Amino acid sequence: MKPVYAGMATAVVGGAFGQLLMKIGMKDLPFGDFNAVLYSVLYHPSSAALILAGIFSYIVSMVVWVHSLKNHELSAAYPVLSLGYVIVYLVAGIWPGLNESITTQKTLGISLIIFGVWYAHTTHSPEKT
């Protein structure tokens, strides 16, 4: 894999896992009462750690993404970000405790995303190097 594509892949995977980590961390935190949130963060540090890890992963992926844009036309690179939806859908469906559903309708939608990314890259003009 060329380094420019490795950067795009890193950005997509990092962003997807950042979202998943934040979702997992948020599961145990209540909302509404500030004291309840503060109590949960103080006495359930694993939740706070997961949220912070997700934010860090997301930030790193965005830095890598910005660098990747230097080597790709935006119209060619941007569809690749959609693959993050695919990763989140599949991992959330099998990750214990998330209880996300994998359905025929959602899988068809994800298949259309994959097809769209493939189609955009097979019909697009060559990338600058």
Image: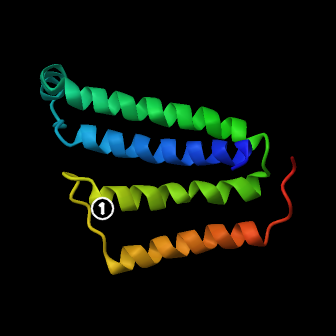
Q: Residue at x 32, y 56 (%)?
A: 92
Q: Nearer the viewer, residue 13 or 36?
A: 13
Report the amino acid beneath label 1. Answer: Gly
Residue at image point 57% right, 43% down: 10
Q: Residues within 10 Å of mark 1 (few under 14, many from 20)?
A: some
Residue picked out by circle 1: 93
> 1 or 111: nearer the eye?
1
Q: Which image quadrant is residue 40 in?
A: top left
Relative to 126, say whether 4 is above or below.
above
Res 107 quadrant in image: bottom left
- The reply, left or right, for residue 8 in relation to residue 51 is right
Above or below, comparing residue 126 to residue 33 in the picture: below
Left or right of residue 9, residue 43 in this image: left
Q: Position of residue 115 (x, y in %)?
A: 59, 74
x%, y% of residue 63? 61, 32
Q: Residue at x 37, y 30 (%)?
A: 53
Left or right relative to 60: residue 80:
right
In the orientation shown, which residue stands out farthest toward the top?
Answer: 42
Q: Is residue 43 above or below residue 75?
A: above
| Number of numbered discs visible in the structure rendering | 1
